[in-house]
Amino acid sequence: MRQRIRHGHSRPEGETVERIRSYEIVSEIAFLGRRRRVYTRIVALSGARPGDRVLDVGCSGGYLARLLAAAVTPDGQVTGIDPASAAIDYARQRAPGNCSFAVGVAQDLDLPDRSFDVVTSTLAVHHIPEAERAAAFREMFRVMRPGGRLLVADFRPSGRRLTLHFVGQAMRHNNVDLLDDLATAAGFQVESHGDLPMLRYVRAVRPDGT
Ligand SMILES: C[S@@+](CC[C@H](N)C(=O)[O-])C[C@H]1O[C@@H](n2cnc3c(N)ncnc32)[C@H](O)[C@@H]1O
């Protein structure tokens, strides 16, 4: 399901997820039927509200983007980026009118400065090459307007055998405790962090005047 590839970007992507239907099924199973509830909570934690411009980094097939799109209607817009073109095709086929998707990598966003109110990223940081994660957070900071809000969540190792089986490989360079440090180093002010089923999240803001 995962593939390590390079496109025409100046930097390698990391591990992309190309088999989107399989990924969707595995994800439903891994969350033990609570995926929708967990992601609805992520939308609430992101603070996305009507009228916001939201960026979802590592959006895969657009599951979270579609929930965000509902939260920002009537005037808001959601943009999803992912290096896996199969995922972007899948997301585009299911996109509501206020969602758009593009192929891209977190560490080199082809997006203007200060153009989003909210940036989200779920289960994607551990896919970004370790050496590129600081750059990815700097990019999230760059494209966010001052006062904007960041919500990043990644796997929280639970020790459960099933979870470890599915995510073990991808987790080998992951340390969710580093999410706070990555956000802080990029210039964000961390407001809170916490746990959800399978996930640890950090909420942060880009301070006004930066
Ligand atoms: C486990 S999936 C998570 C998808 C979705 N955000 C979710 O919560 O279900 C990780 C995603 O990160 C993407 N990815 C890999 N390298 C990336 C990079 N450098 N920048 C952004 N996304 C990347 C993969 O293609 C994949 O779609």
Image: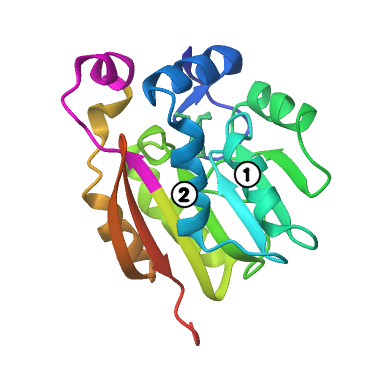
Query: Hey, which residue is sitting farthest right in the picture?
Result: 97
Inspect this view and state whether residue 72 appears.
yes
Residue nearer the viewer, 110 or 118: 118
- Whether residue 120 is in magenta: the answer is no
Identity, as a three-letter code, of the amino acid under mark 2: Ile
Q: Which residues are magenta?
A: 153-169
Identity, as a three-letter code, of the amino acid under mark 1: Leu
- In the displayed structure, 181 sits above or below 127; it is below
Give x and y (percent) for residue 192: 30, 65
Give x and y (percent) for residue 177: 21, 49
Query: Hey, which residue is sitting farthest left in the picture?
Result: 159
- Name the element at disc 1: helix
Is 135 left, or right, of 36 in this rendering?
Answer: left
Inspect this view and state whether residue 13 appears.
no
Q: Quadrant of residue 180?
A: bottom left
The residue at which mark 1 appears reads as 67
Give x and y (percent) for residue 53: 68, 62
Residue nearer the viewer, 195 or 164: 195
- In the displayed structure, 5 sits above or below 96; it is above
Q: CA distance from mark 2 to mark 1?
A: 10 Å
Q: Compare marks 2 and 1 and give the one earlier in the sequence.
A: 2
Do the numbered discs 2 and 1 sit on residues whose CB atoms are within 8 Å? yes
The residue at which mark 2 appears reads as 42
Please give the name of the residue rendered at 60% of the width and 26% of the height, measured from the top-left corner: 84
Is 165 left, or right, of 37 in this rendering?
Answer: left
Q: Quadrant of residue 157?
A: top left
Please give the name of the residue rendered at 71% of the width and 39% of the height, measured from the top-left corner: 102
